[in-house]
Structures are given as structure tokens and as C-alpha cells.
Image (tube, rainbow, N blue to C red):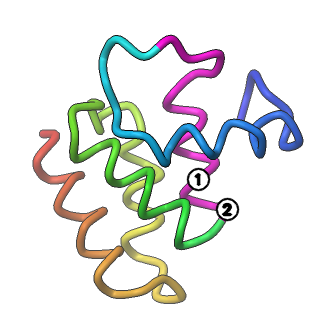
Amino acid sequence: MTGQSEVEMVRFLTLLESPFSAGLDLQVDPYELIRYALEASDYWASKALDWLSNGLAAGPVDDALVAYSTDKSHPQSLRHRAAKLRHSSR
């Protein structure tokens, strides 16, 4: 994470509960938010993956998707979603 502190990022997580739209006026870098969500919990990771599935380009978070998809502490279904998004962004 570069621009926002962890405390600041927590308050933005709820943005992930709304569908992603290219016209959203975000006060945070969406890719920083995705990276943070992937590390926060499986619930928020699922919401972050939803955003990537609904139009936010996955390329800028490819490394985070690799890390998530290979970490066996996460549910298999989410790991497979992350891997699929990673491969579809190529």
C-alpha cells in the first residue's frame, strides 16, 4: 500500500459492497483498495474479486492475485476465482 494508511483503507472497504462502475467517484485508488481487501479477509476478497469480474481491469493487481490464488489458507473457490481473473486479464 502506498497512498493510504491502513486505518484510512478500512473505511473504504464498504465501497466494495456496491457494484463496480467506471463512473464511480472514488476517493481512493481502486487498485490499492483491491490489494487491501485481498489481505483483509475472505469476505472483502470476494467483494474485490466481484469488482474485477465486473469491469475493473485485473492487470494492475496481477501480483496480488497470484499471491491470493496460491495461498491455501483461503477458500478454494476464491483462489480459483482469483486465478481465473488473472488469466483472463492477459
Q: Position of residue 57 (x, y in %)?
A: 26, 31
Residue type of the residue flagged with mark 2? Ala
Image quadrant where residue 44 sits: bottom right
Image quadrant where residue 56 sits: top left
As helix, strand or loop, the secondary structure at mark 2 comes to helix
Q: Does the magenta stretch include residue 29?
A: yes
Image quadrant where residue 80 sits: bottom left
15 left or right of 52 in image: right
Q: Report the magenta stretch's main SS.
A: helix
The circle drawn on residue 37 is: 1
Q: Is residue 15 magenta?
A: no
Q: Please give the range of residues in magenta.
A: 25-40
As helix, strand or loop, the secondary structure at mark 1 comes to helix
Residue at 32 percent of width and 52 percent of height: 50
Q: Position of residue 19 (x, y in %)?
A: 35, 39
Q: Can you identify the residue that label 2 sits on? A: 40
Q: Position of residue 37 (x, y in %)?
A: 59, 53
Q: Which of 14 and 49 is in front in this view?
A: 14
Residue at 21 percent of width and 53 percent of height: 85
- For the residues labelled 1 and 2, say whether their Cβ atoms are less than 8 Å apart: yes
Q: How far apart are marks 1 and 2 (CA)?
A: 5 Å
